[in-house]
Image (tube, grey):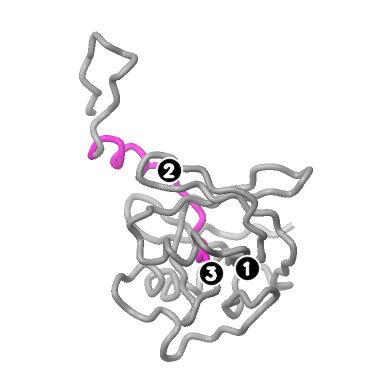
């Protein structure tokens, strides 16, 4: 077990980035792909997606400002969020790969509301109006208000990310 060093100045003390990363790897997270309209469209894999509020409906995700997707997300009025299912690990890997056109080749997608690229067959998708961007360290937290969405009628387990790898959890429908 690794313990952060004891520091006398707790107001400025923070744990080292490697320890921080190791700690957060223990949290299982759902996997989403976020898309933004550009020419060509852009997108990236994220595990930072979360619901924020029901009234009004708000969601958030975080993006490193050094990401190749950042300029499009920074300029976007709307983004797409796709909650991936267990059969879409290849999609998650594609959108996590640097230096490629993630929409090229055999990827199945279409233009949705507000011109946002929508992937085929995620568990659920949302098109969100970007309502705020908040700088947080080397990332930006993007707040979005869902304006459209849909989900599969079939129940499939979600794709999860834990300890640096993809996994699925059994679905116990209900």
The residue to which callout 3 is attached is: 36
Q: Quadrant of residue 129?
A: bottom right
Examine the rendered structure and indicate whether residue 60 appears above or below residue 42: above
| Label placed on residue 123 | 1
Q: Residue furthest front?
A: 75
Upstream in the sequence, badge 3 or badge 1? 3
Q: Quadrant of residue 13?
A: top left
> Residue 95 placed where, x, y %?
41, 71
Q: Residue furthest bottom?
A: 105
Q: Secondary structure at mark 2?
A: loop
Tell me where the magenta segment starts and ends, as one range: 18-34
Examine the rendered structure and indicate whether residue 103 appears above or below residue 128: below
> Residue 53 placed where, x, y %?
70, 42
Mark 1 to mark 2: distance in Å? 21 Å
Upstream in the sequence, badge 1 or badge 2? 2
Residue 22 sits inside the magenta stretch? yes
């Amino acid at each position: 077990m690794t313990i952060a060093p004891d520091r006398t100045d707790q107001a400025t003390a923070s744990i080292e980035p490697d320890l921080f990363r190791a700690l957060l790897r223990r949290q299982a997270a759902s996997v989403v792909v976020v898309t933004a309209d550009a020419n060509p469209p852009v997108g990236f894999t994220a595990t930072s997606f979360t619901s924020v509020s029901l009234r009004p409906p708000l969601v958030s995700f975080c993006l490193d400002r050094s990401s190749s997707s950042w300029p499009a997300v920074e300029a976007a009025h709307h983004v797409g969020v796709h909650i991936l299912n267990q059969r879409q690990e290849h999609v998650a890997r594609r959108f996590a790969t640097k230096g490629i056109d993630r929409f090229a080749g055999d990827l199945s997608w279409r233009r949705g509301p507000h011109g946002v690229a929508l992937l085929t067959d995620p568990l659920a998708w949302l098109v969100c109006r970007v309502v705020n961007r908040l700088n947080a360290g080397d990332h930006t937290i993007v707040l979005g208000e869902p304006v459209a969405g849909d989900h599969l009628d079939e129940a499939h387990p979600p794709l999860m990310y834990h300890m640096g790898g993809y996994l699925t959890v059994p679905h116990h429908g209900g």
